Image (cartoon, rainbow, N blue to C red):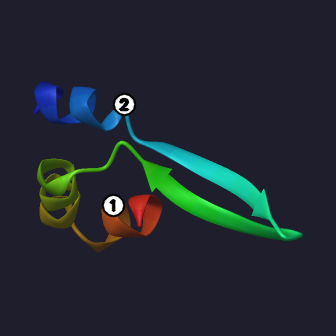
Amino acid sequence: MKWAFMLMRGITEVKLEIDSKVVTQIANMNEVKAKIIRLMGKNCEKYYF
């Protein structure tokens, strides 16, 4: 389980201002990390997605 949480450390929320609008994106997300998050349940999904 520890390795799964170590993987999550690299996920970062990035906020960019484009034409006076703030756009939020998730950086360093891949299929493996997304699958782990989905397997952890809805509460975890709300945090990351």
Image disc number at residue 9: 2
At 33% from the left and 61% from the top, the residue drawn is 44
Q: Amino acid at mark 2?
A: Arg
Q: Secondary structure at mark 1?
A: helix
x and y percentages locating residue 41 in the rendered image: 22, 68
Q: Residue furthest front?
A: 19
Q: Is the C terminus in the top left, top right, bottom left or bottom right quadrant? A: bottom left
> In front of the other: label 2 or label 1?
2
Quick check: 45 above or below 34? below
Q: Which quarter of the figure is the N terminus placed in?
A: top left
Residue 42: x and y in percent read 29, 73
Q: Which residue is pictured at 40% across the width and 41% down the height?
A: 11
Residue 32 picture location, percent across and down = 11, 50
Q: Earlier in the sequence, mark 2 or mark 1?
A: 2
Per the model, the C-alpha gap separating discs 2 and 1 is 14 Å
State the residue in front, 47 or 14.
14
Quadrant assignment, res 47:
bottom left
Element type at marker 2? Answer: loop
Residue 44: give its label: 1
The residue type indicated by label 1 comes to Cys
